[in-house]
Image (cartoon, coloured by chain):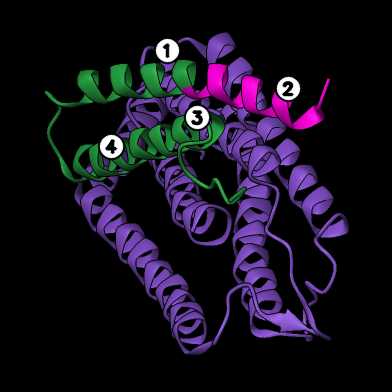
Chain colours: A purple, B green
Amino acid sequence: MAVESTFGQPSPLLERAAVEARYHNVDALYEETRDMRLFGFILFLLADCVLFSSFIFAYLFLRASAPTWPPVVNGTQIGRLDVAFGALNSIVLFGSGVTMHFALESWKNLKTRAFNVWIVTTTLLGIAFLLGQAHEYTSAPAGLTWSGNAFGATYFTLTGLHGFHVFAGVCYLIVLTIQANRGVYTGSKYFGLTAGTLYWHFVDVIWVLLFVLFYLW
Amino acid sequence: MDIAIVERGIALIASIIVGATASWQLKNELSTRGLDATATKVLLGLLVIGCFVVFFASINVLGNFAS
């Protein structure tokens, strides 16, 4: 922004004052709206909770009304899901929640290199979880199909919905990494990183429930 | 060796490490204030519970359908 003095010449002092005033306004606006944006983001997570709850209650209803569970298809009962692999895949996702928290703490402590290491680790663990989920789909027990029975329909819908959330989270993490390295966030302004951490924890917590419902119960 | 035993072993060790780290993070968060800190505390607490679930699943206490 060109700022001219009363003599018509660009004034470095006035320019600096204008820039500082501009950033001061941004800071003030950030402080004013941060809690509102955070509240809005938590409302979004709660709305997502409602979405998952509706599918989970549908699963519970179908399970309660089925004579046997897993259901019998063509005279054969569908096998159980692989608990050992499910546990391994779950801990990969939970581990990514811990690394994401480390990433945010590193950013708060102005440790950019550590932040990059932790957020990239989180992204890779998220991708590993998705690959694990893909392996689960390809090696699902016989009879467990999308349209064949209630078990398959609820399993693929709920884990697919969750997988979509993880995929969106991975994309979000990549965007956050790029933004953070381009200087979008500072030591005191990092709402996007806070929101990203909350989202990733939320995705982890939803998986705790799905793991119990589909693998352990 | 059965692949399931290897998977359970890795899950067991990882659940202890991740659970302990998440508990430590939760302990550090307890003194912080604010809406984001409260949400983080709740979510980290649930994450610790998730680690317990994986721990018990990996030692065959939960999800044992052999019988």
Residue denoted by label 1: A110
Q: Position of residue A199 (x, y in %)?
A: 45, 49
Secondary structure found at label 3: helix
Task: Point out the tag, 1 or 3, that comes first from the N-terminus.
Answer: 3
Q: Residue at x 47, y 9 (%)?
A: A111
Q: Which mark is residue B45?
A: 4
Q: What whole-number distance in Å separates the C-alpha atoms at marks 1 and 2? A: 39 Å
Callout 2: few (<14), some (14-19), or many (20+) C-alpha neighbours within 10 Å? some
Q: What whole-number distance in Å separates the C-alpha atoms at marks 4 and 2? A: 28 Å
Please, what is the three-letter code of the amino acid marked with disc 2?
Val
Q: For residue A11, say whether it is visible.
A: no
Q: Label 2 lies in what chain? A: B
Callout 3: few (<14), some (14-19), or many (20+) C-alpha neighbours within 10 Å? many
Q: Nearer the viewer, residue A36 or A49?
A: A49
Please, what is the three-letter code of the amino acid marked with disc 1?
Leu
Callout 4: few (<14), some (14-19), or many (20+) C-alpha neighbours within 10 Å? some
Q: Residue at x 33, y 66 (%)?
A: A46
Secondary structure found at label 1: loop
Q: What whole-number distance in Å separates the C-alpha atoms at marks 1 and 3? A: 15 Å
Please, what is the three-letter code of the amino acid marked with disc 4?
Gly
Residue denoted by label 3: A100
Residue denoted by label 2: B6
Q: Nearer the viewer, residue B13 or A92?
A: B13
Picture layout, residue B20 above or below residue A32: above
Q: For residue A131, say whether it is visible.
A: yes
Secondary structure found at label 4: helix
Dividing the picture into quadrants, the one containing residue A57 is bottom left
Picture layout, residue B28 above or below residue A40: above
Q: Label 3 lies in what chain? A: A
Please, what is the three-letter code of the amino acid marked with disc 3?
Met
Q: Position of residue A10 (x, y in %)?
A: 49, 29
Q: Label 1 lies in what chain? A: A
